[in-house]
Amino acid sequence: MPRVIGVVVVLVIFVYALVDVIRTDRHQTRGISKTAWIIVMILLPLLGAILWFIFGRPYGRPTAQPIRRHPTAPDDDPEFLRNLEIRRRQQAEDERLKKLKAEHDAKERDGKSSDGTGEAKRGEPDPHDTDELK
């Protein structure tokens, strides 16, 4: 029974140390590279774990968790909301321009002669003020 407990303790220490090596940033390992620490851990399980805790582990700094830079939902993302507002304004502007163009075309049709030539009636100023160009 004590032999089984010893094997379980060694296995727990080995697994904990191996996971700790894997989760540690490669720039924070001391002594040798992160890959070398993993190889040492696999070749010498108990000794590698002890060496890791003494010589390889970063100084007193807890392993930093990755910072989430993006919001989880689109409606929480300020960039998404800004783009949504820009698209809404552009659509409103496009609709306004279409309405103005339709009004302009309607006025232009009313100002044209009824013979279908498309020329302005005589005596009236050209709506586009291009009399000099004719």
Image: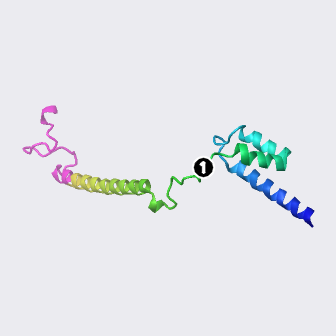
Q: Is residue 26 left or right of residue 36?
A: left
Q: Could you tell me the amino acid type at mark 1?
A: Arg
* Residue at the image position 31 percent from the left and 57 percent from the top: 92
**Where's the C terminus, which quadrant?**
top left
Q: Is residue 91 left or right of residue 69?
A: left
- Examine the structure image and report whether residue 129 is included in the region drawn in magenta: yes
**The residue positioned farthest toward the top in the image shown:** 133
* Residue at the image position 68 percent from the left and 50 percent from the top: 23
Residue 119 location (% of width, % of height) = 18, 43
Secondary structure beneath label 1: loop
Q: Nearer the viewer, residue 21 or 108?
A: 21
**Where's the N terminus, which quadrant?**
bottom right
- Examine the structure image and report whether residue 93 is included in the region drawn in magenta: no
* Residue at the image position 13 percent from the left and 42 percent from the top: 126
Q: Nearer the viewer, residue 104 or 76?
A: 76
Quarter-wise, where is residue 6 in the image? bottom right
Residue 79 location (% of width, % of height) = 42, 53
In magenta, the rendered stretch is 107-134
* Residue at the image position 64 percent from the left and 42 percent from the top: 28
Rendered image coloring scheme: rainbow
Q: Main secondary structure of the magenta part?
A: loop
**Label 1 neighbour load within 10 Å: few <14, some 14-19, many 20+:** few
Against 57, residue 102 (above or below) is: below
Against 82, residue 121 (above or below) is: above
Q: Nearer the viewer, residue 46 or 26?
A: 46
Quarter-wise, where is residue 81 in the image? bottom left
Quarter-wise, where is residue 10 in the image? bottom right
Residue 109 location (% of width, % of height) = 21, 52
Q: Nearer the viewer, residue 33 or 31?
A: 31
Q: Disc 1 designates what residue?
A: 61
